[in-house]
Amino acid sequence: MPKDFRATTLERSIGRRLALWRDERGLSLAEAGQRVGFSSAKLSTMENAVQPSTPLDIMALGYVYNVPTPEWQAVVLRAEYAKTARMGGGSAEPHFDPTADFANLVFEATELRAFTTDLVPTGLQLPSYAHAAGSPERIVQLAMVREAWATRLGDKDPPMVEAVFPEGVLRPVVGGPRVMKAQLLHLMEISEHSTVTVQVIPVVAGAYPAMGCPFTLLGFPHRQHNDVAYLETVIKGEYVEDQALVEQLAQRFAELQKIALSPGESLELIAEAAADL
């Protein structure tokens, strides 16, 4: 294992796929490890991306699990790319879609910090609001992200969620007055959750850092899984994994929180917007 290994989002997606193969066959770590000749500890570190998965090991698992050849070959190619990228070579992996993968990271995160500019953060949206605001091809992906957020917030150990957005998000009547009012009331309700903080940047604040540039920061419990930033445009989603850039975005988020109204004042502003509908 590389010294001080830090798994990339691509390597984490490979680990999830290996775990999915095993789960689909109803095998425990010990049973699967015995079949392939791995210790259960090694298999666990591969599935959790605590160590890189080598193409040979993936090939062995694909054979033992009786995975269709094209499927395990595709994962082997990803592992080969990940190894090349770690050594400083390669370009963007063509078969890895951060937009489709984002819900997985949301589910694994212990800290979520979201800054949006036009809409309520995805995880805090109601289905009716999301349906009115999203494009048809994004509806399923948005639903997966919402489900991941909702599931985690209902856990015994829910993630810390911090959301910041401008007052302008509260004013457009997305989906009609009934849908928008329900969304604002939902924001008020969820903001009372002990691990959720919602702050609104008032119009009078003027210009502010990262204006027009939404992003989400995700933090994870495992030491070998670095914080990740997720950016999305109308065309595609993108992960930012360079830790210097992630830290810059974290500083921007802290600045946005200072400019925004307090959670209590933000709640009052949301309530006023709901009353106006």
Image (cartoon, rainbow, N blue to C red):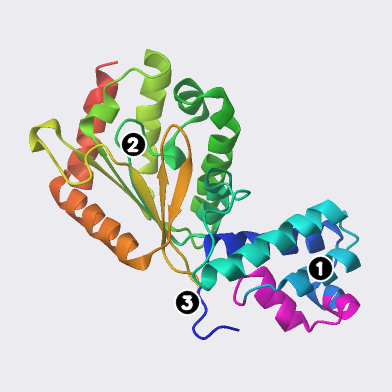
Pointer 1: what residue?
A: 59
Q: Residue at x 47, y 31 (%)?
A: 126
Question: Badge 2, how many Cα within 10 Å: few under 14, some, many 20+?
Answer: some
For the view shown, which residue lies furthest in the top direction?
A: 176
Is residue 164 rendered to the left or right of residue 131?
A: left
Of tags 1 and 2, the one toward the viewer is 1
Residue under the point 60% across and 84% down: 1
Of the numbered discs in the image, which one, if any, rests on residue 136? none
| Picture quadrant where residue 80 is located | bottom right
40 relative to 200, above or below: below
- Front residue of 21/88: it is 88
Foreground tag (3 vs 2): 3
Residue 64 appearing in the image? yes
Give the amino acid type for the residue marked by disc 1 in the picture. Answer: Met
Q: Which residue is mark 2?
A: 188
Q: Secondary structure at mark 1?
A: helix
What residue is shown at x 84% (from left), y 64% (from top)?
A: 62
**Is residue 46 a member of the stretch shown in magenta?**
yes
Circles 1, 2 touching at the beta carbon (< 8 Å): no
Determine whether, in the image, residue 238 is placed left or right of residue 258. right
Residue under pointer 3: 223
Task: Give, as a single range, the part of the protein colored magenta.
Answer: 33-51
Decide which of tag 1 and tag 3 comes sooner along the chain. 1
